[in-house]
Image: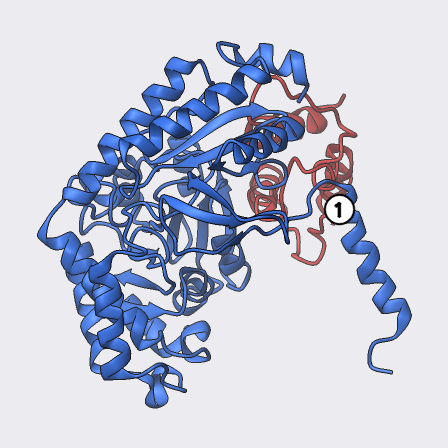
Amino acid sequence: MDDMQKIVLDYVTREYLEDDSQTINPDTPLISGGIVDSFSMVSLKRFLENTYSISIPDDKATPEAFDTVNKICTLVREFQTK
Amino acid sequence: MAYPDPIKQTYQKEIKDIRDAGLFKQERFIHSSQAADITVEFPEGAKLQPAINMCSNNYLGLSSHPEVLKAAHEGLDTRGYGMSSVRFICGTQDIHRELEHKVTEFLGTEATILFPSCMDANAGVFEAVLNDKDVMIADRLVHASIIDGMRLCKAQQDTFKHSDMAHLEEKLQLHADKRVKLIITDGVFSMDGDTAKLDEIVRLAERYGALVFVDDSHGSGYIGKTGRGTQEKYGVMGKIDIITTTFGKALGGASGGCVSGRREIVELCRQKARPYLFSNTVAPVIVAGVLRVLEILSKSTERRDKLETNTAHWRKGLTEAGFVLKEGDTSIVPVMLFNAKLAQDVSRDLYTEGVYAMGFFFPVVPKGQARIRTQVSAGHEVRHLDKALAAFKKVGQKFDILGKTKDEIIQKYGM
């Protein structure tokens, strides 16, 4: 797991999991799996923008693009290079 | 053909899927007025059966109170059945204004506006006072009507973990740049019966310059020493910027709701809130009934005091019998069964024993947290509660769950 995966996974764990009994990995479905609801995506988007000094347009911050830690990392890298 | 077969079949399949998933809601028909003792037809067509109602929101037992009925009759006789209008065209009567003033006085706020329901109040208020420069930060267990209201609003949406003040503070810091930061919570959470920590929430709001919204539908009328709601319990009267509540629970049980709070916010709702502008005025008969309810509650705390005593008796009885309960100090007392089928089976057997109490399971509550949600009323007498306790014990024994821990119940019945 690279640094970005670790950072995003750690944030999602702290932010969204209710107790220690739940664990997730970089491919766990977050939104379609019912772990993150669409309301709560906002804080994740803000966290990514603040942490990586990027701006993600709302039309790119879709439930599909945010569905796993790996997909989120792909999205962040796309905007880091722009 | 206005209703083509493929569409009909699609709907039929959807209904079948709901049934197959065990989520189909079957209504029970009550042949009496709302009270501790009711007469029930269930399933449809079955012989009528008397039952003790342990699952209504009739917290103060005012739904069929003679004085409230009398006031409602007077309202009907003097102000008619309906107004055939929204408020701002020709639907505002003197008694609508009077009720708004009385609710303001009762809740200790600056102003109040009536809505056809609290669902409508929650659907209208956010859009009326917030825009895309603002953020709404909601407890993750708020009522569905708040979620729908938030969806209708252009402000950014965020959430904090249930009653987690450290998490809320993080969110207030995260959204420091927003014009309005609105903290949103229920006063009493309807599924668990716990209350929002409004003293801490108000402290955080003051520190970060945020506003506070509380839906006190399950608290108004009986929480707090004089029944002014969770804001009274936590000593923050006058510090909640927006309170929404219903007249459909403790405050008479018919229907109708309101937004009560800061004068400007209420005025903006009157000018802009769509469920207010585009749905009929609250019927005069309901307005007259709620006016009498507030008069009764302002004169005496007898009913909420009785409810407190009844709730303590009920909670103690269930605890001594060996049930697992959700901790709390409101009149919502969830009996935890964890397994959805067990909750349904216990509810069915309770009904056979003459007790009406519904099972709740996913998606209404999280998976593995199925329960019977019991609700105590000032309309109950000790004899009702003792009879219901005897039924709970009998059914609890049958399923061998008395004295068992959460883990033991889950081990026996699964999640």
Looking at the colours in the rendered structure, which chain would you say is drawn in blue? B
The residue that appears at 34% across and 34% down in the rendered structure is B384
Depth order, front residue of B212/B94: B94
Viewed as shown, does residue A4 lie left or right of B130? right
* Position of residue B178 measured from the top left corner of the image (x, y, whole percent): 42, 54
Residue lying at the far right of the rendered structure: B6
Query: How was this image coloured?
Result: by chain
Q: Is residue B110 visible?
A: no
Depth order, front residue of A77/B83: B83
Q: Is mark 1 on a helix, strand or loop?
A: helix
Residue lying at the far left of the rendered structure: B299
Viewed as shown, does residue B57 lie left or right of B145? left
Residue tagged by mark 1?
A: B19
- Relative to B228, is B233 above or below? above
Shown colour of chain A = red
- Please identify the quadrant where the C terminus of chain B is shown: top right
The residue that appears at 39% across and 35% down in the rendered structure is B193
Q: In which quarter of the image is residue B231?
A: top left
The residue that appears at 70% across and 41% down in the rendered structure is A31
* Position of residue B256 measured from the top left corner of the image (x, y, whole percent): 37, 65
Q: Quadrant of residue B280?
A: bottom left
* Position of residue B284 measured from the top left corner of the image (x, y, whole percent): 30, 76
Q: In which quarter of the image is residue B327?
A: top left
* Position of residue B167 measured from the top left corner of the image (x, y, whole percent): 44, 33
Q: What chain letter is assigned to the residue under label 1?
A: B
- In the image, what residue type sits under mark 1? Arg
- Relative to B229, is B399 above or below? above
Depth order, front residue of A69/B304: B304
Q: Count numbered badges in the picture.
A: 1
